[in-house]
Image: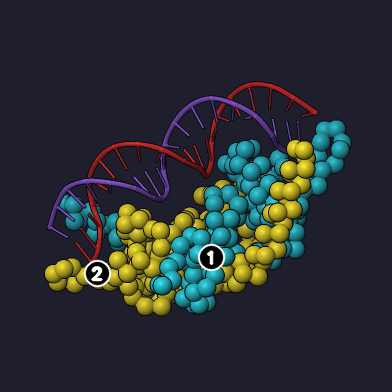
Chain colours: A cyan, B yellow, C purple, D red
Amino acid sequence: MIPTITPDTASLPAHGSEDCRALSEILVRIGDKWTILVVGALGAEQQRFNDLKRLVGGISQRMLSLTLRGLVRDGLATRTQFPTIPPKVEYALTPRGRSLLQPIDALADWARQHRAEIEKSREMFDDEADQAVA
Amino acid sequence: MIPTITPDTASLPAHGSEDCRALSEILVRIGDKWTILVVGALGAEQQRFNDLKRLVGGISQRMLSLTLRGLVRDGLATRTQFPTIPPKVEYALTPRGRSLLQPIDALADWARQHRAEIEKSREMFDDEADQAVA
DNA sequence: CGGAATCCTGCTAGATACTG
DNA sequence: CAGTATCTAGCAGGATTCCG
């Protein structure tokens, strides 16, 4: 029986190959188009729905709503609604949500350090591809 | 002019709000369904195409091919082909690719530490939703 | 203001078949 | 063995509309 790596039973050699499926799971969770940006927008302080919408430029109401509900569902954010008129709802990161900022920042650091090189690699790669065609 | 956070001009408050778009970029890069698993499979040592296909269970030839090409394009992996019959191609992480393993592992650690709690939060959230319906 | 419901569409990724 | 080419279904996500 050879152990395989699947999105459901993922493993990274660095950690042995039992159950790193956890990594795959959370990447599905935070690897989508908006979650990280919303978490970032919530990072400093709690925010109201439309403030978040403005802060995270380009997001639709639908996707902001879905993203926030996902965060709340996973206990990464809280939703507090005030029964005023007009209604007011505030979202904030939970301690668990804030703890996510650290590995996220590590990734962001890596991204900043390697962005230029990666961009250069891409150009080289694409240029070679063009030459191969010509 | 209020600065906004978009997938193209992303920012995390933790790092000031100029150009954390880099994070969003690399999340698009590694946040997909297969890249992390392939990087993980390449983590220990170089691998041949069909070995990777076996290692990363469930991936199609097409997606493995596309994923590998993306990694090579970004200078995260190398492709070495031997003009033998039958052909033999080996993929390996570059130093840059290996350096990615560290922030990835930080994320994996976070995932392992919080997986159970998140799972519990989800069940609670879903139960409450069910009650609301009933 | 803060959503939910509906509709519609482009792209992703799986399956299959073919090639050097 | 190591891919590419083609076709297609499903779904993510945008736009729009309506509601408390």
Q: Is residue A117 above or below residue A48?
A: below
Q: Residues within 10 Å of mark 2 (few under 14, many from 20)?
A: some
Residue drawn at 58 percent across, 55 percent down: A29
Q: Please provide percent x and percent y for residue B61.
A: 32, 57
Left/right placement of residue A44 relative to residue A28 reads right
- Identify which residue, B110 or B99, lies in the foreground: B110
Q: Is residue A44 at least partly visible in the picture?
A: no
Q: Mark 1 belongs to which subunit?
A: A
Q: Please provide percent x and percent y for residue B71.
A: 37, 63
Residue at the farthest right position: A84
Q: Is residue B131 above or below residue B73?
A: above
Q: Please provide percent x and percent y for residue B44.
A: 41, 78
Label 1 amino acid? Answer: Arg
Left/right placement of residue B73 relative to residue A116 reads left
Q: Which mark is residue B98?
A: none
Label 2 amino acid? Answer: Val
Left/right placement of residue B79 relative to residue A120 reads left
Q: Which mark is residue B89?
A: 2
